Image (cartoon, rainbow, N blue to C red):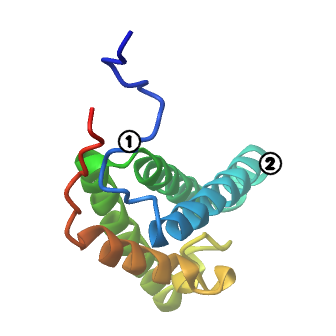
Amino acid sequence: MPETTKDAAAPNAAGPGIGRGPGRLLLSLYGVFTVAALSRAIVQISMQFDQAPLAYLLSLLAGIVYAVITVALWRGGEGARKVALVSCALELAGVLTVGTLTLVDSGAFPDQTVWSDYGMGYLFLPVVVPVTGLLWLRRPARPQQDSGS
């Protein structure tokens, strides 16, 4: 019996491979960022939310954005490419905004966020990775190859 529908949870193998090749490194980095940011935010929110609520909510937001990008890179296809592009742009805007605010008014952030000081606590990867992601995702999609079916 020929397969007529794709498994909704499976990555789009026939799509333009945004999570393949060099995109695999981005996929891996965003996967690690997702776990790190969400874990940190969940612990901070559950144990010390009253100390720096804005910082912890921003770390949670960063983790959610990372998760969206991770899933989009994994799924592939043009729809996922658009979601990943918008998410990377939002991430970069967040890093630049929060990074600037933490330098201008460090008192507004009594504790660090993932995006504080342009991601200095994460070796500046939070500012480098979305730029790299935007460059990767803006490249033209390769046409799908016919598998002969």
- Residue 117 vs 22, above or below: the answer is below
Residue density around tag 1, few if under 14, some if 14–19, many if 20 or more, within 10 Å: many
Please give left or right for residue 141 compared with residue 55 in the image: left
Task: List the residue tagged with mark 2.
Answer: 47
How many labels sit on residues? Answer: 2
- Quadrant into which the C terminus falls: top left
The answer for how far apart the CA atoms under marks 1 and 2 are is: 39 Å
Residue density around tag 2, few if under 14, some if 14–19, many if 20 or more, within 10 Å: few
> Residue at coordinates 36% horizontally, 49% vertically from top-left?
76
Kindly indicate the quadrant of the structure image that contains residue 124: bottom right
Tell which residue pokes out farthest to the bottom in this image. Answer: 103
Q: Are the residues at dot 1 and dot 2 in contact (C-beta closer than 8 Å)?
A: no
Decide which of 32, 78 is in the foreground and name it.
Answer: 78
- What's under tag 1, amino acid-wise? Asn
Tell which residue pokes out farthest to the top in this image. Answer: 1
Please give left or right for residue 38 compared with residue 97 in the image: right
Task: List the residue tagged with mark 1.
Answer: 12
Image x and y of residue 69, in percent: 44, 55
Give me the disc on residue 104.
none
Decide which of 37, 134 is in the foreground and name it.
Answer: 134
Please give left or right for residue 19 compared with residue 56 in the image: left
Decide which of 59, 144 is in the foreground and name it.
Answer: 144
Q: Secondary structure at mark 2?
A: helix
- What's under tag 2, amino acid-wise? Met
- Residue 42 vs 108, above or below: the answer is above
Image x and y of residue 30, in percent: 55, 62
Kindly indicate the quadrant of the structure image that contains residue 111: bottom right
Q: Secondary structure at mark 1?
A: loop
The tag earlier along the polypeptide, 1 or 2, is 1
Kindly indicate the quadrant of the structure image that contains residue 138: bottom left
> Residue at coordinates 72% horizontally, 57% vertically from top-left?
40
> Residue at coordinates 54% horizontally, 74% vertically from top-left?
115
